[in-house]
Amino acid sequence: MLPNKMRISANATNSLRRLQSNTGLTVNIGARLAFFTSLEREYRFDPLSVAIQHDGRELDKHTWLGDYAAVSEHLLNQAYPNFTKQQFHNAWAAHIEDGLVYVASIRSLTTILNR
């Protein structure tokens, strides 16, 4: 469902780098945390009103999603049952952008554990 190579925005890339600097979490782990935080908050991507930039970091799907690829794709499919492959990619990137609003301010791993 998601493409084999996926790219996020430059803004999200910078936020993930700051998160990595603050916590030691790698960019892909930070992206997973942001994605699931966004889903938990029940954010929904609207492809008609939100333009997604793919001008930042590109990694393969396995690196971005790791062992959670099937879960991530299933949750996206449940939230957006009629999306195309490109729309799923945009939704995934939008969820990372949304989730980073909440996780980018994390200063340490202890903060994550205390949430």
Image (cartoon, rainbow, N blue to C red):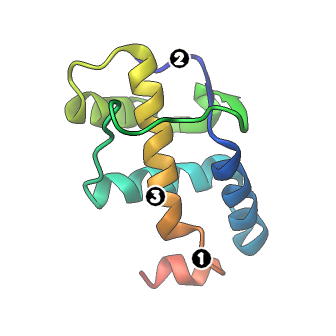
Q: Are marks 3 and 2 in contact (CB under 8 Å)?
A: no
**Inter-mark Cα distance, 3 to 1:** 12 Å
- Give the number of the disc on residue 106: 1
First in sequence, mark 2 or 1: give its number. Answer: 2
Q: Quadrant of residue 6?
A: top right
Asked if the residue at tag 1 contacts the one at tag 2, i.e. Cβ–Cβ closer than 8 Å, the answer is no
The Cα atoms of the two marked residues, 3 and 2, are separated by: 21 Å
Residue at x 65%, y 80% (from the top left corner): 108
Callout 3, which amino acid?
Answer: Gly
Residue 63: where, in percent of width, then height?
A: 64, 34
Viewport quadrant of the C terminus: bottom left
Q: Is residue 89 left or right of residue 56?
A: left
Q: How far apart, in angstroms, are the residues tagged by discs 2 and 1?
A: 29 Å
Q: Give the residue drawn at x 73%, y 63%.
A: 20
Pick whichever, 23 or 93, lies toward us: 93
| Element at label 2 | loop
Dot placed on the residue nearer the N-terminal end, 3 or 1 = 3
- Label 1 Cα neighbours within 10 Å, binned few <14 / some 14-19 / many ≥20: some
Q: Residue at x 29, y 37 (%)?
A: 75
Q: Residue at x 41, y 15 (%)?
A: 85
Q: Which residue is mark 2?
A: 3
Residue closer to the observer: 97 or 60: 97
**SS at badge 1:** loop
* Label 2 Cα neighbours within 10 Å, binned few <14 / some 14-19 / many ≥20: few
Residue 5's place in the image compared with 113, above or below, is above
What is the three-letter code of the residue carrying label 2? Pro
Q: Amino acid at mark 1?
A: Ile
Measured from the top left, where is residue 50 in percent x and y?
41, 39
Residue to which mark 3 is pinned:
99
Q: Position of residue 83 (x, y in %)?
A: 29, 20
